Amino acid sequence: MTRGLLRRASAVVALGLAVLVGAPKSARACACGCGVFEIGGPLMYPTDVGVTAFVEWDWQSQNQNWHGTSSAPAEDNSDRLIRTNFFTLGGIAQFNRSWGVIARVPYWYRNFVTADEDTGEIQDLKSSSLGDIRLEGVYTGFSEDLSTGLTFGFKLPTGQWKEAGFDRDTQIGSGSVDLLLGIYHLGAITSNRLVNWFVSAKLDWPFATQDGYNPGAEFDTSLGAYLDLELGGGVKLSPVLQVLGSYRMRDSGPEANYLDTGYVRVLVAPGLGISFGRLSVYGELAFPIYQNVNGNQLVASVLAKGIVAYSF
């Protein structure tokens, strides 16, 4: 009797170990890091009293499986591709020298390719919907030129998070209400303001979640410099170079993939802005130079951003 129990107990332990050891082979995970699109240079923050409306496009194609600080075999992750186009309609309203608001209303289109965990059959899934809306207040009363600001607000659970075939960490929406806290500073390096610099940081902390999925908190930073080159006729050219950093904690809860979420990432992002009076256009490419992910996650080799803004 005792030997039989021991044999059954040993079998259970062995099965459990096999599941734990084999879990990464069927991992379903991605390192979206979408919060990194929310930070950056002067176009992202108010620099004068008034209203600025903007349209933003962001893009990334996560097609490389990554483990720790290096690439890993594709078969270690059942996910094969997560390609996302992010379209955002936004506005910055600076009421006076101290207070303003920022609103961002995103719409996402996502293509998700994954292998069925039971059959191994490749599934090519697509989803498009309104994303999670971000509403923030801005305080810029530290200086007359609005060069330093604090941002504070919420991310709302307006995005789709029940799309069939998508895991909770690959859904367009997180299903959570997040607290958003940020700080930024814009400064001049030369007295004629030809060479300038900026630094920003933002914390995204989910505090109200749904249905057993708690997305990890994310902290994003940027540090960069840019030129203001007057070309005449009201035209200004602004080359930009910045370094972006992201830290995301692991997801938690019964619907989360704890082992294969969370990361640290550093990117270098050259960009170029052109202003025609009240109209501004900006483009940027960001390239990862350091990535350290937990478990197996899909990452992108480049992130793209484009913004068209008009100040009233």
Image (cartoon, rainbow, N blue to C red):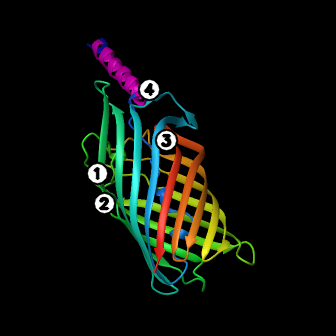
Can you tell which mark lies on residue 299?
Answer: 3
- The residue identified by callout 2 is 157
Spatial CA distance of label 2 from label 4 is: 33 Å
Figure quadrant of residue 272: bottom right
- CB atoms of marks 2 and 4 within 8 Å: no
- Disc 1 crowd rating (10 Å Cα; few below 14, some 14-19, many 20+) is many
- CB atoms of marks 3 and 4 within 8 Å: no
Looking at the image, tell me whether mark 2 or mark 4 is earlier in sequence order: 4
Spatial CA distance of label 1 from label 4 is: 26 Å
Spatial CA distance of label 2 from label 3 is: 24 Å
- CB atoms of marks 1 and 2 within 8 Å: yes
Of the two numbered discs 2 and 3 in the rendering, the one whose residue sits closer to the viewer: 3
Percent position of residue 56, x then y: 44, 62
Residue at left 51%, top 58%? 219
Task: Note whether 23 is above or below 255 in the view shown.
Answer: above
Residue 95 lies in the magenta-colored region? no
Residue type, label 1:
Trp
SS of the residue under disc 2 = loop
Q: Tell me the magenta residue range.
A: 4-25
Res 253 seen here:
no
- The residue identified by callout 4 is 75
